[in-house]
Amino acid sequence: MIGVLFAGGKSSRMGSNKALLPFGGYPTLAEFQLRRLEEIFEAVYISVKNADTLPFTCKQILDPPHADFAPTAGFIAAFEALHVSRFFALSVDTPFVGVDEIMRLIEADEESLDAVIARTPQGTHPLCGIYHRSLAPHFVRMAQEHDHRLGKLLSCVHTRYVDFADEAPFANLNHPYEYDAALQRMLINKQP
């Protein structure tokens, strides 16, 4: 399966592009995520707004020109660029989603589904799961209507939710304090 790392957001709550923040011994969070995912998937692409966003070489998928800052644009571009029936989507700002979580989602997938999405007691995680090509026309419609609610789409199609009891792997780095906490968590995890 192919992995697509979504890194085309505004990062308005962080105050700077979170994909470019140093993380886990790498110059950027995006490269940290890429290297992790390359150990799991046969190929990994990074979905970005502009070709010059990332300071390292990787396979990129560019959002359509003039697209809204929303994952919808990334999904449209991914389905156009990749000739696959499905791919694994992960947000760049969830660096603790690990092999165990990803493998559980992959194992839950079936051809008859439109999506397989992680869910925890606090809610669903639309940017952590598998999306099938059957959803491509839905994303085009959503973009035309400027309706970017992934949760709404997933509730209207054949989605399988995989439940996880632990919230920790799905922590998002949206604010500076969450980024600082993630850096501390990385330091603690590295201690002998």
Image (spheres, rainbow, N blue to C red):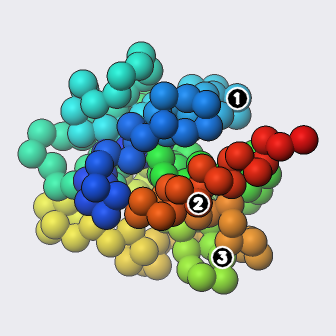
Q: Residue, x 68% and y 71% (percent of image)? A: 167
User: Residue lying furthest right in this view?
Assistant: 192
The quarter of the picture where residue 125 lies is bottom right
- Towards the viewer: 135 or 32: 32
Q: Earlier in the sequence, mark 1 or mark 2?
A: 1
Which residue is nearer to you in this view: 175 or 184? 184
Residue 101 pos. (x, y %): 73, 55
Q: Which mark is residue 181?
A: 2
For disc 1, the marked residue is: 39
Report the residue at 57% width, 34% height from top: 32
Q: What's the amino acid at mark 3? A: Thr
Secondary structure, mark 2, is helix
* Amino acid found under the numbered disc labelled 1: Glu
Q: Is residue 142 above or below residue 180?
A: below
Q: Is residue 139 visible in the rendered structure shown here?
A: no
Task: Give how far across and how far down residue 122 sits, in percent.
Answer: 60, 82
Name the residue that disc number 3 marks.
Answer: 120
